[in-house]
Amino acid sequence: MNLLHVDNITVSFDGFKAVNALSFDIETTELRAIIGPNGAGKTTFMDIVTGKTRPDSGDVRWGVNGVSLLRKSEAQIAQLGIGRKFQKPTVFETQTVYDNLLMALSNNRNPFSVLVYKQNSKDDEKIQNIATQINLNEKMDILAGELSHGQKQWLEIGMLLAQNPKLLLIDEPAAGMTAPERALTVRLLRELALSRAVVVVEHDMEFIRQLECRVTVLHEGAVLAEGQIDFVTQNQEVIEVYLGR
Ligand SMILES: Nc1ncnc2c1ncn2[C@@H]1O[C@H](COP(=O)(O)OP(=O)(O)OP(=O)(O)O)[C@@H](O)[C@H]1O
Ligand SMILES: [Mg+2]
């Protein structure tokens, strides 16, 4: 069943079509990689789904009822269960890993909300579970500012998980990660996609290969090819516009 239905969306910036009649679907539980050259419209696609950018035409439909996301605010879209991770992690550096997760759980990314939020044992259990999943269960008392870049990325993913998203949009997670961190991130994303949809934009082809998922290749704002990694990497057009550069 489709969770997200992107239907013929176009968006122009000063007459330049950053996204051009783009259509594709994301299933309820699936891991999907989006690749393509710089400026292909990958981030703009995420901006549209999250309500940050409004398309000129087309529609984005969500869930079994196919509600249009285009008339919803960014906050409403987040409430529906769409979480987004930007390239640069935005964690509270002066707070511990535990408190960052607690803040995310209290649904208010304001460091002071933790002071008034009434914590219960269920929260503690949930924080422990998330921390284990993101490989930070032994770093709970460490200040987020002392984590490595990769660990900060995981913490931010953990903060998104606290909101139980149905769809996670993740832009270039591997950038700046060490090889072991990349391997753990592959494992994490594959695991997360067993119970939700996860869409990953990434340039690192080795990383993409290890995700072992369906790959959508964007070029000039539209889908150029789609399929398993070996299928798309053998596509002549994909080689010409992206891989062979
Ligand atoms: N807010 C904006 N105003 C004007 N132009 C924009 C805006 N956002 C994106 N663009 C342009 O739209 C095109 C698509 O950009 P986008 O960021 O979606 O590409 P991308 O596929 O994410 O590329 P990269 O791999 O470099 O991150 C680019 O030419 C970009 O300059
Ligand atoms: Mg981008």
Image (cartoon, rainbow, N blue to C red):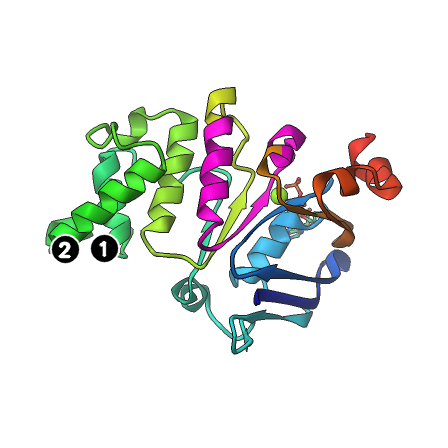
Provide residue 201's location: percent of width, then percent of height: 60, 43
Where is ligand 2, by quadrant?
Answer: top right
Provide residue 61's location: percent of width, then percent of height: 58, 71
Q: Which residues are magenta?
A: 182-209
Q: Residue beneath label 1, please?
A: 106
- In this picture, residue 117 sits left or right of residue 28: left
Foreground residue, 167 or 46?
167
Magenta span includes 3: no
**Vertical placement of 93 versus 237: above or below?**
above
**Vertical placement of 125 versus 245: above or below?**
below
Q: For the view shown, which residue lies furthest in the top direction?
A: 179
Q: Is residue 205 visible?
A: yes
- In this picture, residue 23 sits left or right of residue 100: right
Residue sitting at x 42%, y 68%: 76
Q: Residue beneath label 2, please?
A: 117
**Vertical placement of 112 versus 183: above or below?**
below
Bin the neighbour count of mark 1 within 10 Å (Cα to Cα): few under 14, some 14-19, many 20 and up: some
Q: Is residue 55 visible?
A: no
- Give the alpha-carbon distance from disc 1 to disc 2, as whole Å: 7 Å
Q: Quadrant of the C terminus?
A: top right
Bin the neighbour count of mark 2 within 10 Å (Cα to Cα): few under 14, some 14-19, many 20 and up: some
Residue sitting at x 52%, y 21%: 179
Magenta span includes 190: yes
Query: What amino acid does circle 1 point to?
Result: Ser
Marks 2 and 1: in contact by CB < 8 Å?
A: yes
| Quarter holding residue 48 | bottom right
CB of mark 2 near ligand 2 (< 8 Å): no
Give the structural element (helix, strand or loop) at label 2.
loop
| Quarter holding residue 141 | top left
Q: Quadrant of the N terminus?
A: bottom right
